[in-house]
Image (cartoon, rainbow, N blue to C red):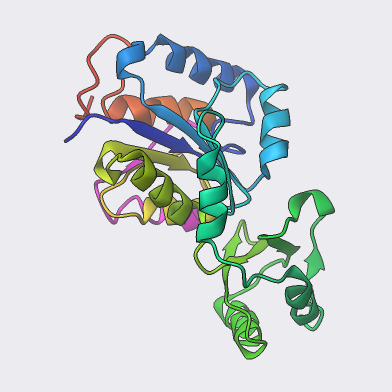
């Protein structure tokens, strides 16, 4: 198993939630030898500005890259050319206004606050939707000639994104640009909108102890997915140790 060169983590419910646990994760991360510490990527449904503001409020380590808006935005402080290149890769056919017109005919749906919206992400609340209801929305989008995908998580959050975008697709694109193999990468999460990261070929995963069933169901399917007992950031530390990241040992990528 190859040493880890990149770690991509969700924020809320994963490394954010319990500030004491977040602080332990920060200290763990900083204690890794600099030459063996993987690149750190935050991969959240929050928009980029919201994540940057969060970094001022909670004791997180500074990330190398930020993926925002459920895979529709990229922040690359040291390589700004990647930001525009990624946006271009998502295409130009996404139209939030037309999506809004379609969603106006869906019973029980309400638009999320403006701070959760941007030009490549249309976000809604729809409680308790089953596969049939989601299928009807997808069919309505297709009928309106809208090329988009639906990401539904937490039995409530409905994100409509460009067909080429989700957390996993964004991460795979970034790894490709950085020439880092997916087999040299690990991810962590707690809800269904993190699932796309786990479904990437050869990726290793950490499912935190507080994860929802929609993600926990992956744990028994493949030994690439580690189910932590600890919750939130403590579970992330547990998982990273499992995948060979240990301040006291060389990063081998092997089981702890």
Vertical position of residue 111 compared to residue 211: above or below = below
Q: Residue at x 48, y 25 (%)?
A: 234
Q: How far across and down, in percent of the image, does residue 182 sit?
A: 29, 45
Q: Quadrant of residue 188?
A: top left
At 36% from the left and 56% from the top, the residue drawn is: 199
Q: How many marks?
A: 0
Q: Which residues are magenta?
A: 212-231
Give the residue at x 71% y 59%: 119
Residue 230 against residue 188 in the figure, above or below? above
Q: Is residue 52 left or right of residue 43?
A: right
Q: Please determine whether, in this image, residue 118 is positioned above or below residue 250.
A: below
Q: Position of residue 131 (x, y in %)?
A: 55, 77
Q: Main secondary structure of the magenta part?
A: loop
Which residue lies most toward the bottom here? 143
Q: Is residue 23 visible?
A: yes
Kindly indicate the quadrant of the structure image that contains residue 31.
top left
**Residue 220 lies in the magenta stretch:** yes
In the image, is 103 to the left or to the right of 11?
Answer: right
Quadrant of the snapshot with the C terminus = top left
Q: Percent position (x, y) of residue 204? A: 31, 42
**Which residue is situated farthest in the front direction here?**
81
Q: Nearer the viewer, residue 2 or 174?
A: 174
Image quadrant where one finds the N terminus: top left
Q: Nearer the viewer, residue 145 or 255?
A: 145
Q: Quadrant of residue 28?
A: top left
Q: Is residue 71 visible?
A: no
Q: Residue at x 67, y 60 (%)?
A: 121
Residue 1 magenta-drawn?
no
Q: Position of residue 114 (x, y in %)?
A: 83, 54
Q: Does residue 100 sit above or below 209 in this rendering? A: below
């Amino acid at each position: 198993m190859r040493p880890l060169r990149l770690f991509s983590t969700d924020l809320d419910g994963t490394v954010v939630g319990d500030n004491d646990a977040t602080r332990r994760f920060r200290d763990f991360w900083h204690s890794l030898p600099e030459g063996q510490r993987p690149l750190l990527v935050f991969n959240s449904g929050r928009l980029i500005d919201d994540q940057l503001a969060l970094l001022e409020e909670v004791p997180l380590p500074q990330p190398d890259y930020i993926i925002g808006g459920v895979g529709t935005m990229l922040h690359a402080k040291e390589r700004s050319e990647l930001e525009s290149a990624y946006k271009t890769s998502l295409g130009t056919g996404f139209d939030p206004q037309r999506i809004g017109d379609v969603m106006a005919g869906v019973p029980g749906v309400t638009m999320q606050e403006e701070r959760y919206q941007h030009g490549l992400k249309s976000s809604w609340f729809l409680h308790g939707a089953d596969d049939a209801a989601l299928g009807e929305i997808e069919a309505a989008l297709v009928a309106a000639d809208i090329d988009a995908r639906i990401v539904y998580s937490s039995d409530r959050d409905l994100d409509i994104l460009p067909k080429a975008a989700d957390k996993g697709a964004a991460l795979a694109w970034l790894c490709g640009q950085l020439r880092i193999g997916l087999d040299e990468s690990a991810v962590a999460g707690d809800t269904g909108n993190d699932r796309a990261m786990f479904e990437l070929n050869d990726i290793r995963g950490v499912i935190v102890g507080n994860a929802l069933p929609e993600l926990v169901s992956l744990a028994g399917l493949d030994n690439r997915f580690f189910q932590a007992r600890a919750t939130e950031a403590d579970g992330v530390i547990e998982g990273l140790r499992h995948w060979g990241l240990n301040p006291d040992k060389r990063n081998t990528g092997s089981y702890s």
